[in-house]
Image (cartoon, rainbow, N blue to C red):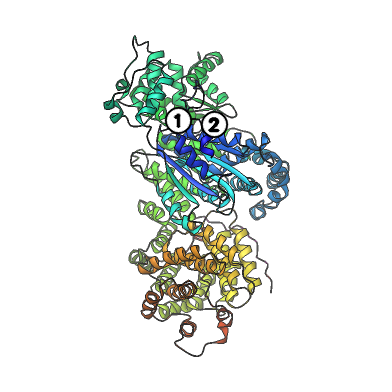
Amino acid sequence: MVASKIPEISGPPSPRRSPFVNRREELTRLLSYLPPSKQTGSFVILKAPSGFGKTRLTTRLLELLQEQGMPAVAVEPQVRAKTSAHSVYQGFFIQRCAEALDALAADGSVSLPRFEEFLKSDRLRRARAMDWRSAMRKVPSLKTLYDVSVELLDRVFNTGDHSARKLLTSDSRDAVDTCMRYARQVEGIAQLVIVVREAQHIDSTSLQFLGEIFHPATARSVILEYTQDSSGALNVLFDDFISTAPLQDAAWLRIVELVQLTKPHLEELLRQTLPGSRELSGEYYLRWDGNVRAINQLRFSVSMECHPALPQLSDVAIGVIDGYRRRITALSPTARMILCLLLAHGEAIPSFLLQLLLEQLNTLASKFTVEREIIALITEELVVRHQGDALGIDNEDVAEAVHTHPPLAGMLLLAKSALRDHYRDAVFSPGDARKDISLALRQALRLSVELADVTTMEAMVEQLTGTVTTNIDQSWYVGQITSAVNGNAHLFADQRDKLLIWAAELACEVADFQKARDLLRQLSTRSTFSEVLLCSCLIETGDHSEAADKAKLLKLSADVEESFAGELIELILLRCTGHIEQARDLWERLDQIPSTVSRRLYGYLLRFKELVDDFPACVDALRASADWFGERGLASSAAYSELTLASHLARMGNVAGACESIETARSLLALTTRDQHILLNNEAAVNLLSSTPSPAQCCEWLVRGVPCAGDDYSALVLYTNLAVAAVLSGRHDVAREASERSMRILAAPKFAERNVFWGAIFNLGFVDDLLALGQRAELDRLSAKLEPHVLQDEYWQYRFKRSESVSERFSVMLSKPYHPLFLSHWTLDVDGLRTLKPGYFAAPGNTTSRST
C-alpha cells in the first residue's frame, strides 16, 4: 500500500517552512487520484482557507511522487495576495505552466524540449502567422518596410518581442498562443502531475486549457490549490467549470477539502516548532481558526520579542494578521518600503528593479543595505525569492497585513507612485519603437487607476488604441477603466466619455454586452457611433423595447448614416421578434434605394439577407457581404459573414465551400478572442453534414465551445449539437448530460427567437430514441406549441411527419437523421460600426479569393 510509505512526520523542520504533520489521510487520498495509482486523468481541486497547509501538503506530495520516479512539478504564479490578483489576465497561468514545464525539461525529468528549443522548431509557423493583412494595409514607406522586416526577423530568430523571456510575460494573443502550443507538448508524456498554486486567481482561458490537456483519456493529472475566502464557496469561474465537468467524465473531477488539524497534531506541530511548549487548552483549540501560521507568530514572539517565558497560544488568538502587523512595525524603514513595493507591484519583482526603486526613494539605501534587509525578510518568512532572482510576498496574510496596516498607508502610496513613474517612463522611453511594453502598459494603467492619475490613464489608453485587440484579455483593460470612471470626481466630462467609449468598445469585442451597455449609458455626450453601439448591445441583452425606441429616433435623424443605422436596428428587431414579412419588406425597400450601396454599413444589409431569405436566395448576398467588409479592412465583420455563408453552403451540399469559409473566418479571427464558440460550433455542424462526419472530433470542438457561449441561445445550439455528436461517437454519458441541459433551456428560454426550437426538439428526439432518456413526452408537448418556422416551415412539417412532400433543396439536410444547428451573427459588430466615427478612414483590405 502506498499509505504505508508515508511518514507521519517528515524529518526536521526547515527554517523556511513549517514541519509537516498529520496529513497522512490527505496524502493517501491524493495519491490514489494520481498516477501511478490511477491510470486515467484526474482534475483535483484542493481547497482550504488561508494558512491550512495546502502548499506544504502538495510540496510533500511532489517529493513522494519524485521519489517514485513520477514527473511532477509545481506552477507558481507569484500572485498569491488578494490585492495582486489584478495582475492576472487571460492566459497568464498558461504562461506560468510553460515556465514550469521548461524548468522540468531543464532537469531532464521528462523528454520535453526546452522552451527556447521549441521556439526554434516553431519559427516557421510563427513567421507564417504574422499579421500580413495589417502590414499590407499600411501606407508603403521605409518605416513600414523596416517594421515588417524586424518583426519577421524576430519571429524567425526568437529575438525582440519573440524572445523566450518576452513570450512568457507578454499579454499578446500571439505570446499566449505560443506558450499554449509549448504546454501542449505534455501530450507526448505518458504520465505527469502538475500542481498549480493559488488557483483561486486563475483565468478562464487557462482553466479551460488545463481541462483540455489533463482530460480523462490521459494518465496525466493536475491539482489546483484553491484558497477559500470567508464565505468558503468557490468563485463563479469554478462554478461554471464544475457545471461542465460531467461533459468530460463523472470520475474525472475531484474536490478535496483540507480540514483543520486535530488538537493532538496541532500540539505536535507546536512541540516541533517550539520545544518545551505546554499542551494546548481546549478553550484555545475551540477558538483557533485553523491557520497554522499562528505557530510562526509564537516562534517570532519567543525569538524576536525576547519574551521571558513561553507565551500561550491564546496570546495570538486575536489573529494571525495582527501578529504580522506587530512584526512589520518592528522592521526598519527600508524593510517596510520593500514590503510596500512588493505589494504594490502585484507580480514578483526582479531584485535589480527593487534595488533601483529603493535608491530613487532613498539615496541612503545602498546595495549592501537592501540585500541585507531582503535576506532578513526571507529569513523571517515575510518575502520569498523566486526563480530568476525575483522577489514576492507569497503569504496572503502578510500581504493583507501590509495592505491594511494604517502606518504603512503613506509608504504604500509612495511605492505605487514610484512604480507608476518607472513603468510610464518605460512606455515612453526612446529606443526601438517596436519593443514589447505590454507589462509596462498594464502596470502603468493599473497604478494610474489606483492613484486616480487621469493624465497617465489617458496616455496609456492612447498607447493601447489600435493595438489592444491583439491582447489576449481585453476584459482586463475594461475592468481597469470601469474602476477608473466609477466614482472618480477628478475626471472632466470629456475625459470620462473618452474612457467610457474606449472601454465599451473593448467590452463589445469580448461579447460582454451588459458591461458595454452599462458603460454607454453613462455617457454625457452622445454620438452616432455610441448610440448605434448601444442599440446593438440592447438587442444582445434582451432590452428590445429600449432598442426599438432608440432606433425610431435614429431613423428620424437628418444624418443619412444615422438614419440607415436605425433602419438596420429595426430590421434585426423585427426578425428577432418573429415579424418576418415586415422585416422582408424593410430589407427590400432599403435594397431598392440607389444610395444604399454608398452607406457605411451597407455590408450589414447584405449579411442580413439571411434574416429574411433562406438558401440559396441569400448566398450571393452573403458572399458580397464578406467581400465588402474584406475590401475595407474590416476583418472581424468579414469573418462573421463567412461563418454565416458556411452554414448555407453546407446545407446546399457544398461542404468544400463551407470548409473554405470556415478556414477564412478562422484566419480573420486569429488575433481576436471573441466568438470562438461560433467558429467551433459551425465547424462541427459542417462536419456533421458531410458525407464522412467525425463525431468524436465534433464532440471535442463542442465541449471546448460550451464555456465560451455567453447566452442561452448559443448554449442551446451547442448543447443540442453536442448531444447528437456524443451519441454518434458512443459517449452516451455526455449525450445524456447535454440533452438534460438543453431541456432546461427549452423549459425557460431567455431569448425571443423561437425558430431554433424546431431543430433543438428534433435533435433531442433523435438522441432520446437512441438512449431512451424519457424526454419524448415533453418534447412532443413543446413541438405542439411551436409557431410555423418563418423560413423553413415546409421542411420542418415534413421532418415532424406532418406533411408528405418537401422541396428538393432540402435533400442534403434530409439525408441525415439529425439536423446540425448553426450560429449566425445577427448584430452590428463594433468592428464595422467604427466606420461611423468622425474622421473614419477606410483602410485598404484584401478581397477574399474563392473557389467557384
Q: Is the residue 72 above or below the residue 507 in the image?
A: above
Q: Is residue 624 shown to the viewer in this render?
A: no
Residue 116 appears at what percent x and percent y? 69, 39
Quadrant of res 628: bottom right
Q: Is residue 347 left or right of residue 545?
A: right
Q: What residue lies at 45% left-to-right and 37% top-to-bottom?
A: 25
Q: Is the residue 781 above or below the residue 400 in the image?
A: below
Residue 318 appears at what percent x and percent y? 29, 25
Residue 758 appears at what percent x and percent y? 44, 76
Q: Is residue 375 shown to the viewer in this render?
A: yes
> Disc 2 on helix, strand or loop?
helix
Check the image and name the residue furthest to the left.
283
Q: Nearer the viewer, mark 2 or mark 1?
A: 1
* Residue bounds of the magenta highlight: 836-849
Residue 519 appears at what percent x and percent y? 38, 51
Three-letter amino acid code at the position of disc 1? Ala
> Disc 1 on helix, strand or loop?
helix
Query: Looking at the image, is mark 2 or mark 1 earlier in the sequence?
Result: 1
Q: What residue lies at 48% left-to-right and 34% top-to-bottom?
A: 57
Q: Nearer the viewer, residue 33 or 484?
A: 33
Q: Which mark is residue 425?
A: 2
Q: What residue lies at 37% left-to-right and 42% top-to-bottom?
A: 492
Q: Is residue 413 left or right of residue 432?
A: left
Q: Which mark is residue 18?
A: none
Q: Nearer the viewer, residue 537 or 48?
A: 48
Three-letter amino acid code at the position of disc 2? Asp
Task: Give the mark count.
Answer: 2
Give the residue pinned by disc 1: 344
Q: Nearer the viewer, residue 319 or 393?
A: 319
